[in-house]
Amino acid sequence: MSEVFDLAELAASADLERELGRLAADHGIIRTRQLNQQETWTVLSAALTRELLSDPRLSNDVHTHAPHGALVPGLQVMLLEQDDPGHARYRRLVSAAFASKAVRQLEPRIVEVTRQLLDKLGDSGTVDFIDAFTYPMPLEVICDLLGVPGEDRDPFRKWAMDISAAPSAEAMQAAAGELFAYCIGLIGAKREQPTEDLLGELIAARFEDGSGLSDEELSSFAAVLLIAGHDTVTNLLANALHELLTHPEQLAALRADRSLVGQAVEEALRFRGSAMTTVNRVALTDIEAGGVTLREGELVRFLLNAANRDAEVREDGHTFDIRRATAQHVAFGMGPHFCLGQRLARQEATIALTEILDRFPTLELGVPAGEVRWLASDAIRGLEALPLRYARETV
């Protein structure tokens, strides 16, 4: 096919997923243009997504095989941009840290942060809920998890905003570079004075040969956790609330039966997941897939939101239904690079939705649904703002 689609332009529409469905009916793979104007093959089909995400002929090590496709050129130690065996070795250490005491005991802090932010809203009003809640909540959790000192959190927030809302690839890379440099200093301080947080756990962790992670590896992990663990949860929460408020029968069902909150989170992930695409991969050899040839050296990524609504998987994929018997999805990817933070993201979303609904019997969009604007992004699916009207009493 010759047409090249600008995914960021398509994403500015609420109809993105339906448009992707129409494209997927004819093409399992399309050509898209990224924010930096690079062209890449983008996989839409659920079957091809499941097949190719585990295909060793597609390498995550773009720094070696296609440096122009790297998330942050020059930063070669990111876990999500490594191949096995190095990736598997690194991931085992990080997986163990995610199962550590620092993460297991995080739930009370998530509840505390959630309630503090909701307290600030008062009993009633209208507010941009992204600015007031869904943005600061996961950021505070990530800062706690990494052990970022309180006095350093303002610049940390600025870097997070600059990275998530960057107008260009250059601006995003500049913010990421500043964040990486800060993390190098933070890790140096923690090496001198050990701390009981996730970074502290990783600094102390050792491979089988007794070696540990380098400062560069630790810093890249911290940077990726901020970018992936904050931005995606921010938009997952906002998207979930948007879908519940624009599907009032679903919201009523959840208010009537709080045991459905876990299913509501899974359906929100499937229906309009915030991590819209994966990072780039590069073809190590020519690959025949979906009726096209992915040439050696070409970039390939996966449009997870398209795969999650694929008509070949479910006929009612464009229906938001929290009672769905199974909400199987690939919102967290699959294969060797399946998202390590998926448990934490689910935990944050479940706690947040429960607390919000318990706090505010009245919750509705503050503007007509048609006035809500979607981000023009080729990677994150989210809203520019989510104006909500809320009250502690039923109006």
Image (cartoon, rainbow, N blue to C red):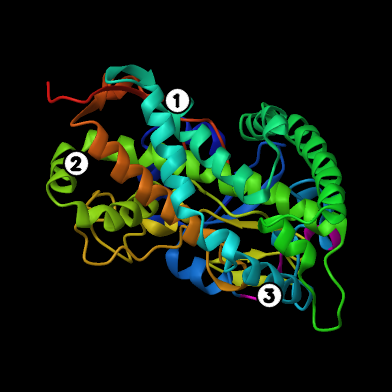
Task: Depth check: give the residue in front, 157 or 69.
Answer: 157
Per the rendering, the mark at residue 251 is 2
In the image, residue 365 lies at what x, y percent?
A: 27, 24
Q: Secondary structure at mark 3?
A: helix
Between discs 1 and 3, the one toward the N terminus: 3
Q: For the point 29% across and 39% down, which residue is it? A: 243
Q: Quadrant of the C terminus?
A: top left
Residue at mark 1 to residue at mark 3: CA–CA distance: 36 Å
Q: Amino acid at mark 2?
A: Leu
Q: Residue at x 80, y 33 (%)?
A: 174
Q: Secondary structure at mark 2?
A: helix
- Report, in whole angstroms, how far the alpha carbon at label 3 lies from the one at label 2: 39 Å
Using the image, tell me which numbered label, if any, was put on residue 245: none
Residue at mark 3: 92
Eyeballing the image, is 347 above or below 290? above
What residue does disc 1 label? 132
Q: Is residue 60 magenta?
A: yes
**Residue type indicated by callout 1:** Ala
Going by the image, does 352 lie left or right of 140? left
Magenta-tinted stretch = 55-64
Q: Is residue 135 left or right of residue 280?
A: left
The answer to if 224 sits in the magenta stretch is no
Residue density around tag 1, few if under 14, some if 14–19, many if 20 or more, within 10 Å: some
Mark 3 or mark 2: name the one nearer the start of the chain: 3
- Residue 77 visible somewhere in the drawing: no
Residue 215 image point, x, y percent: 86, 56
User: Given the image, on which type of amino acid does mark 3 rest?
Assistant: Arg
Please give the name of the residue rendered at 62% of the width and 67% of the height, measured from the top-left corner. Answer: 337
